[in-house]
Image: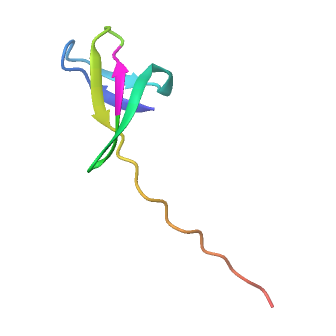
Amino acid sequence: MLTHLCTSCSKRQIIFPTQFTAVTASEQGPVATFDCWCGAEQSAPLGWAAAEPRKRVLAA
């Protein structure tokens, strides 16, 4: 889920994964293409960050 400012209706909308029509790779990371609630096709970077490894404590 992400928020996006639509270039067509100028509203900030919550975009759900079910609205995605495509996800493509770019040099900056994945970019989602989706339909805004107004019906306009939009795209936005997903901005995923690499996950940090979990720290584990081992008991002896």
The quarter of the picture where the C terminus appears is bottom right
Q: Is residue 35 magenta?
A: yes
Who's the residue at 19% across and 14% down the image? 8
Quadrant (top left/top right/bottom left/bottom right) for the N terminus: top left
Magenta span includes 15: no
User: Residue drawn 78% across and 86% down?
Assistant: 59
Q: Where 21 falls versus 45 (above or below)? A: above
Up the image or down, 22 lies above or below 56; here it is above
Q: Position of residue 44 (x, y in %)?
A: 29, 33
Residue that extends furthest to the right in the rendered view of this protein? 60
Quarter of the image where one finds residue 37: top left
The reply, left or right, for residue 58 in relation to residue 37 is: right
| Colour scheme of the picture | rainbow
Residue 15: % across, % down: 40, 24
**Residue furthest bottom in the image:** 60
Q: Which of 26 and 59 lies nearest the eye of the viewer?
A: 26
12 displayed left or right of 51: left
Vertical order, 21 against 24 (above or below): above
* Magenta stretch in the rendered image: 32-36
Q: How many marks?
A: 0
Q: Residue at x 27, y 22 (%)?
A: 42
In the figure, is residue 56 to the left or right of 47? right
- The residue that appears at 48% across and 27% down in the rendered structure is 17
Percent of width and height locating residue 38:
31, 8
Magenta stretch prevailing secondary structure? strand
Residue 27: give x, y in percent of width and height: 26, 50
